[in-house]
Image (spheres, grey):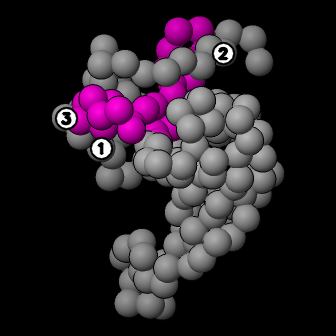
Amino acid sequence: MAGVALALAGAEDVDALAALYAACLDDGWSAEALARLLATPEGFAVIARIDDVPQAFALARVVAEDCELLALGTRPGARRRGLARRLVAALAREAARRGARAMFLEVAEDNRAARALYAAAGFARAGRRPAYYARPGNAGAGGAAAALVLRRDLDARGVA
C-alpha cells in the first residue's frame, strides 16, 4: 500500500498514540499509561501511518521468551487495508528481535474479524476465559463475553 510507514513508537509519540487508541477502541489507555509501558524495557508499540497520519497501532511487551500483544487498533476509516496484518507481522519481528519465542493474546470470542486476522497470522487457540469481557447488553454470562487465548510460535526472524 503506497504511503504506509510502520515505525516503533517512542516517548515523542505518546500523545498521538493515546489519541489513536481512543479513536480505534473503547476504553483506551491514557497517555500516562502508554508512557509507562514505553518507558519499560519490556514494552513497545508500532504505529502505522498513511501519508504521515497515524492510522493504526499495536502495543506489546516481551517478558522472558513470551510476547503479549496487548492491543491492536485501526481507525474506522482505515480498516480493511491490511494495516492490522502488517502490524502483527512487525510486532512478531520486533518480539523475536527482543528474544521472544512465542506470542500470546486475548481476543473476544465474539470478535469474528479479529479472530480471522489472528488465524491468518498463524495464531491458534491455547485457552478460553469465560465471562472475561464486560458486555452491557449481553444477557449470557452475566453481561460478559468469553476471551480466547491465542498463541503463535516465533522463530528468530519472527516468522511462525
Label 3, secondary structure: give it.
Answer: helix
Q: Is residue 109 visible in this depiction of the protein? A: no
Determine whether the residue tagged by mark 2 lies in a helix, strand or loop: strand
**95, 16: nearer the viewer:** 95
The residue that mark 3 highlights is 32
* Left or right: 121, with 18 as reference point: right
Magenta-colored stretch includes residue 56: yes
The residue nearer to you, when weighing 15 against 121, is 121
Q: Residue 112, percent across and down? A: 68, 64
Q: Nearer the viewer, residue 125 or 155?
A: 155
Q: Label 1's element?
A: loop
Q: Which residue is mark 1?
A: 29
State the residue at coordinates (43%, 83%).
131
Q: Earlier in the sequence, mark 1 or mark 2?
A: 2
Displayed quadrant of residue 116: bottom right
Please name the residue shown 78% across and 46% down the image: 160
Q: Nearer the viewer, residue 145 or 33?
A: 33
Mark number, residue 89: none
Specify the amino acid type for callout 3: Glu
Examine the rendered structure and indicate whether residue 73 appears above or below residue 78.
below
Image coords of residue 95 (percent x, y): 57, 37
Tell me which segment is drawn in magenta.
Answer: 34-60
Q: Residue 4, which numbered label?
A: 2
Residue 26 part of the magenta segment: no
- Name the residue at the left extreme: 32
Q: Is residue 76 above or below residue 101?
A: above
N-term mark: 2 or 3: 2
